[in-house]
Image: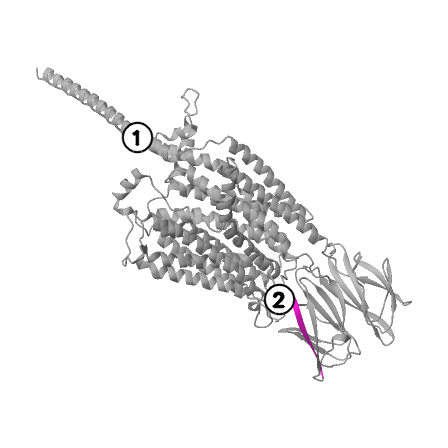
């Protein structure tokens, strides 16, 4: 869930520690210069909520289109796009640990948020600039001439964004909690509810809006998909977020840094390990727990708290596998949607907009689970413990990937059979005004006038071509390409014109024209142009959006004709302009077409079941996991468990990039099944671990230690008193002895 990470980082201290901290003036919040309240709420939280909404809009808006940017702008393949995407997400969930340490140990929350937000904003701006293809498009052909420059800017931008968004993640919610006094617990709880709503509102709106912005056409020299706008709007929202947060500076309560509990925990663990290593002799008595070797330096309460934390962190070990599947909604599932039909009748859904199904279902499933499912389970007298809920959540995520694999099998059945790198494909178009017989390699067939093959034929890198009873010609074509060979007649001699293209993704609707007319033609569709097409030549491929397209054909004399064509998602056609075309208002009856790639036929609605299963698993897994962690964690170490929870998300994304690079599965559905099987295996392991877990009450344990502390203090005081008495007695004996020596000397 896009929400639950921040609230948990609000530190809560036990009563005894609160009293001691109150005596330390350094740790008291510095009240804002203008303490304004509205209905009992500090006005400063308004700036924090708006800041969070804009920041979440910025992050999720950028992330929604990121994998498509890798694939279509940077021209990376699916596997490498997925790898870089999950590397970025992993960094976003590793950097919160750094942000928490910086805020608690050096800068404080306010300065950390401001400084890292500046870094964050710079990263978003760099991403938007790096997506402008016109910067290096010297020949104005719509393709950047220096792709390395754009890749470098993109990677620098993503690195800064990961550092910024992760660094402020543990600070913003906790900083909001600092704005309330101790007697405003109810208002603080309401604030976190509003804060949670702002996160989901920002992510939902951005996931809807930025794909729409991406689908727009923009550019100086050529019109391309508008990635600069899709990244630029999130960058602008991040600027607004930073400005709004700084404007409220005078109203904030600012707590000075007091040292980071995570650092203290790590030091305690490290000292225990080193002390045990130095005392590894068999003659030294063993201790009940290996952490007890830290007693020489740390008090027993802290050691007991660390034990409780490590007990929960041990249960976290299998959890990254859930996130490995969950975060593929933004990568593999989005790429899957690019090969599907997004026409829902009243509206057309872009592939990257399908991610909005998740936050929409969250808003539905959370109350359904809390008020319907869980009460029904309780009435059935089933002991649905938190760990059992987590197990069920993992199983549901596995089922979601099984559903994704079933959908992928249906998609694969409709995909073209593209050539490998050691072979190529070709189809033929007959522009001669009569039927011709063609022998191409092992294939022999007849083509009618102005007609083409329905399917591509597969060849080795060269084959022999014979037209009618003419001479044989050896055709050599590049490997891994699909080719269209047009047969034309010139001076009573038939020749061929070859058009070679690299294998294109089925997700894009690319079309091409062959000009069989006797003069140069200019063809446009909307703001896109096919250029001036010389007679008996092919145009370049142009991406035409799904829906009704209006083509305008203009000859050298200035005459024009128009024809319209309805296109589905992912279709590709070669349009033939015959020699006898007449330039009337509507020339549609004269234009011939050859279908190169069929339109996507599997509807995006088939992804909804897998999103439903994944979201149901998320609600059961994520919400319950955080609640369980809180119930089992010491009051002053919830931030440590939150850092551990975020770390499981980072490790999950690392698992994805390892599998994406290491797995050599030829089919995507097989990879989905692999992930599902791994999660089910991990789910079984977690269920076994959960079976042996004993629930504890940290509050009771801490209270018991608090009651024992006075006794320990008495023992320490008694020991100190005895020690002082012994030292005083020894000192008297020493003095008496010295006096005796002096007397003897005088005599």
* SS majority, magenta: strand
Left or right: 43, with 368 as reference point = left
In the depicted view, which residue is nearer to us: 83 or 702? 702
What residue is rendered at 70% in x and 67% in y? 511
Q: In this view, does 725 lie to the left or right of 134?
A: left
Which residue in the protein does label 2 denote?
143
Residue that carries the numbered disc 1 in the rendered image: 707
Give the mark nearer the N terminus: 2 vs 1: 2
612 relative to 130, above or below: above
**Residue 97, x across and y down, in percent:** 43, 46
Instruction: Report the span colored magenta.
Output: 546-556
Rendered location of residue 738, percent (x, y): 14, 19
Give neighbour class at mark 1: few <14, some 14-19, many 20+ (Cα, 10 Å). Answer: few
In what element is the residue under mark 2? loop
Q: Mark 2–mark 1 contact, CB under 8 Å?
A: no
Q: Where is residue 630 in the image (x, y as percent from the top left)?
A: 42, 40
In the image, is residue 453 part of the stretch drawn in magenta?
Answer: no
Counting from the top left corner in percent of width and height, residue 133 is at 57, 66
Residue at 85% of width from left, 71% of height from top?
494
């Amino acid at each position: 869930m896009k929400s639950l990470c921040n609230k948990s980082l609000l530190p809560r201290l036990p009563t005894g520690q609160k009293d001691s901290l109150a005596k330390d003036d350094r740790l008291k919040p510095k009240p804002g210069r203008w303490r304004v309240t509205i209905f009992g709420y500090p006005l400063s939280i308004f700036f924090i909520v708006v800041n969070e909404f804009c920041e979440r809009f910025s992050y999720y808006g950028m992330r929604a289109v990121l994998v498509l940017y890798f694939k279509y702008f940077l021209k990376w393949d699916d596997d490498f796009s997925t790898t870089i995407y999950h590397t970025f997400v992993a960094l976003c969930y590793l950097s919160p640990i750094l942000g928490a340490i910086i805020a608690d140990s050096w800068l404080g929350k306010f300065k950390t948020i401001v400084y890292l937000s500046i870094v964050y904003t710079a990263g978003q701006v760099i991403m938007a600039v790096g997506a402008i293809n016109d910067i290096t498009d010297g020949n104005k052909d719509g393709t950047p001439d220096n792709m390395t420059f754009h890749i470098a800017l993109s990677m620098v931008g993503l690195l800064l964004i990961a550092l910024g968004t992760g660094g402020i993640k543990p600070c913003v919610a906790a900083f909001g909690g600092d704005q309330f006094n101790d007697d405003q617990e109810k208002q603080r709880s309401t604030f976190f509810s509003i804060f949670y709503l702002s996160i989901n509102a920002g992510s939902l709106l951005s996931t809807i809006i930025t794909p729409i912005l991406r689908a727009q056409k923009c550019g100086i020299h050529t019109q391309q998909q508008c990635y600069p706008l899709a990244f630029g709007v999130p960058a602008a929202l991040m600027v607004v977020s930073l400005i709004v947060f700084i404007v409220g500076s005078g109203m904030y309560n600012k707590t000075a840094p007091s040292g980071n509990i995570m650092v203290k925990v790590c030091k305690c663990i490290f000292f225990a390990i080193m002390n045990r290593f130095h005392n590894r002799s068999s003659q030294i008595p063993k201790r009940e727990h290996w952490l007890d070797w830290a007693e020489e330096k740390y008090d027993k309460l802290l050691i007991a708290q660390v034990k409780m934390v490590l007990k929960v962190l041990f249960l976290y070990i299998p959890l990254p596998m859930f996130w490995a599947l969950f975060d593929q909604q933004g990568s593999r599932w989005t790429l899957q949607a690019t090969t599907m039909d997004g026409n829902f009748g009243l509206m057309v859904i872009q592939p990257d907009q399908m991610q909005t199904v998740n936050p929409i279902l969250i808003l539905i499933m959370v109350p359904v689970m809390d008020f319907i499912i869980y009460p029904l389970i309780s009435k059935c007298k089933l002991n649905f413990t938190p760990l059992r809920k987590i197990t069920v959540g993992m199983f549901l995520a596995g089922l979601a990937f099984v559903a994704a694999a079933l959908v992928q099998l249906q998609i694969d059945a409709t995909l073209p059979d593209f050539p490998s790198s050691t072979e190529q494909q070709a189809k033929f178009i007959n522009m001669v005004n009569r039927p011709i017989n063609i022998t191409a390699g092992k294939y022999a067939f007849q083509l009618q006038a102005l007609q083409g093959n329905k399917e591509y034929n597969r060849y080795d890198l060269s084959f022999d071509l014979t037209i009618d009873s003419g001479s044989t010609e050896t055709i050599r074509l590049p490997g891994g390409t699909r080719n269209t060979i047009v047969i034309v007649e010139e001076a009573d001699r038939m020749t061929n014109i070859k058009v070679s293209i690299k294998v294109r993704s089925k997700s894009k609707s690319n079309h091409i024209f062959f000009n069989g007319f006797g003069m140069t033609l200019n063809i446009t569709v909307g703001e896109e142009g096919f250029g001036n097409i010389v007679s008996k030549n092919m145009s370049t491929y142009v991406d035409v959006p799904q829906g009704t397209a209006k083509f305008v054909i203009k000859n050298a004399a200035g005459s024009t004709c128009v024809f319209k064509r309805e296109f589905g998602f992912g279709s590709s056609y070669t349009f033939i302009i015959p020699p006898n075309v007449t330039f009337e208002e509507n020339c549609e009856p004269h234009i011939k077409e050859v279908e190169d790639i069929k339109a996507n036929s599997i509807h995006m609605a088939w992804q909804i079941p897998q999103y439903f299963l994944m979201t149901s698993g998320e609600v059961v897994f994520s919400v319950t996991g955080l609640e369980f962690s809180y119930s089992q964690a010491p009051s002053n170490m919830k931030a440590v468990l939150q850092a551990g929870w975020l770390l499981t998300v980072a490790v999950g994304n690392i698992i994805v990039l390892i599998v994406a690079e290491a797995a050599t599965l030829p089919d995507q559905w097989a990879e989905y099944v692999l992930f599902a099987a791994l999660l089910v295996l991990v789910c079984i392991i977690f269920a076994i671990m959960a079976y042996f877990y004993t629930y504890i009450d940290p509050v009771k344990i801490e209270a018991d230690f608090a009651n024992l502390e006075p006794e320990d203090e008495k023992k320490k005081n008694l020991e100190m008193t005895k020690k002082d008495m012994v030292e005083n007695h020894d000192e008297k004996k020493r003095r008496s002895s010295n006096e005796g020596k002096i007397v003897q000397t005088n005599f």
